[in-house]
Image (cartoon, coloured by chain):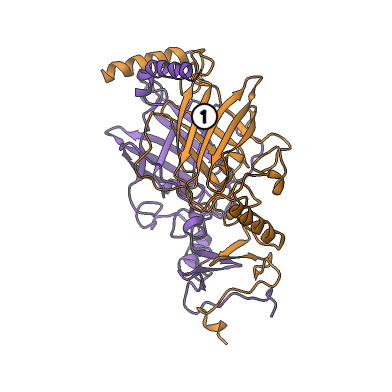
Chain colours: A orange, B purple
Amino acid sequence: MLLRRSAIAGALAAALCAACTVAFAADDSKYPEWRGQWRRPPGVGIQWDPTKALGPAQQAPLTSEYQKVFEASMADQRAGGQGGDPTYTCIPPGMPRAMTVVFPMDIIILPEATYIIIEYSNQVRRIYTDGRDWPKEAEPAFLGYSIGKWVDENGDGKYDVLEVETRGMKGPRSFDASGLPLHVDNDTVVKERIYLDKSNRDVLIDEVTTIDKALTKPWTVTKKYVRETKNVMWFEYNCTENNRHVQIGKDNFYVSADGFLMPVRKGQAPPDLKYFKDAQP
Amino acid sequence: MVSRTTAAFIALTALFGMASAAHAFDEAKYPDLSGLWHRIGPDRWDGASNRDAPLTPEYRAIHEKVRKNEAGNMIADPMLTCQAPGMPRVMQAYAPLEFIVTPDTTHILIENIHDSRRIHTDGRPWPGEADPSFRGLSIGQWQDSDGDGRSDTLVVETRHFQGPRYFDGSGLPLHQDNNTVIRERIFLDKSNQDILVDEITVTDGALTKPWTVTKTYRRDRTPVVNHRETVCADHSNHVAIGEEMYVVGPDGNLAPTRPGQSAPDLRYFPR
């Protein structure tokens, strides 16, 4: 039976691809065409809600407790620190922040999973679409565990919307570089609807709804990406390369251009050097 | 509306019953590289002692210096501070290899630091200029070596590097001019389809001649419930300050990495 299925599938694939050597691997007739390089639209920054400025203007529905966390983060950043943005040590942003797509992404649609490969911090999202249930145990991850479902919303026999739910996150994570916080319990649930703009097939839309105890209600933000298809080049972004930020214990410092440790805040104490003989009084 | 959508989904799922049983890529044209591939052998480039590495005298001396740690342990292994190993070292497979074969591109996903590769198989020429990178720019071509109508060998050439890069964790160096050229032939072992072979030939100014090493990987066909996320920066306790490397101890304090190492200079902290 399996052999017969494979033979039929192979024959169908061969017939479908006979005239199209660059056809996508998955079944083009059933899945949307999302190949290419996807980028943030020109002029769109890296704040979570791209329609509002970074910082308080985001008007995130934070609980009063997490509003204070957010204000402390911004105050620390004004003083020279990193606040609640954990990515300065090259920890990846994780979900949902990964979908800000700081640097380009490509998307590979296979029947059993959709891969989203994001150059920023080498993040590879695997969205399982094989009908699996949530695993009883999954190691927490910055990107979480994503299960998706393809939907043929307009009933034309072809999938057009990928609905995704992501759970099982680990932290620390923030929505964006201002340190806009997520809850420390990491029980975040992220729901997405990803589809092409009907009026422009080179625009991809991701409606991202975040459910998190740092928020008083689910927060939906719409991200858009534009497609580059001609002469696509991929560059490599290595966060750790020339990263001058270092973390020692719970404090962050900076390494100067001439190779010396330096404070990031006015009046910051140096690290304790008790394990070095030549630093003893 | 919801029920209509759901009904459509169910209908399509039934339609896909056959397709989803088949592997993701075109099985009629490409080899089945599904599963996760684990390196066979130790973390040494030639799988043994590297004794036959054809290093030039200059680079043999550099290797000795690194090995003896005369330059401080800063440069011994950039991976300690989460620097990307780059090519060819990523093929040491510090995490299992996962292949996604599409007609345009073969992706090799490796959850280590920044090791994942993108091998272009769309027939593109070498660009006049390309940003140098640790993993380089890879252009490949599928070949049907036995003429059975199905591609079986991925022939890859990789150029346009940046450094520093080393072959492995022993500090075996590549030339700092980064003009490395790497040619690979990747194929399944004819006698065992669960063994993947990568014949890797490195041409580099640190070597007296092209050096060919054959790496092998063993397939794990166990269905993957959870692809493990690896984040080096999340677990690395090494800190680089200038040319020196230190560790942060469990108590959060900076500590030396070798006997007699001096404390970092705190000249920029007010006294």
The reply, left or right, for residue B173 in relation to residue A62 is: left
Q: Nearer the viewer, residue A227 or A140?
A: A140
Q: Nearer the viewer, residue A232 or B268?
A: B268
The answer to whether residue B180 is seen in the rendering is no
Q: Which residue is mark 1?
A: B121
Quadrant containing the C terminus of chain B is bottom right
Above-or-below relation of B77 to A40: below
The image shows residue B135 at horizontal and vertical percentages of 53, 45
Question: How many marks are shown on the rendered structure?
Answer: 1
The image shows residue A51 at horizontal and vertical percentages of 70, 37
Above-or-below relation of A15 to B189: above
Q: Nearer the viewer, residue A184 or A10?
A: A184
x 65%, y 59%: residue: A72
The reply, left or right, for residue A151 in relation to residue A215 is: left
Chain assignment, label 1:
B
The reply, left or right, for residue B218 in relation to residue A85 is: left
Give the image quarter of residue A100. Answer: top right
The residue at the far bottom in this view is A281
Is disc 1 surrounded by few (<14), some (14 to 19) or many (20+) residues within 10 Å?
many
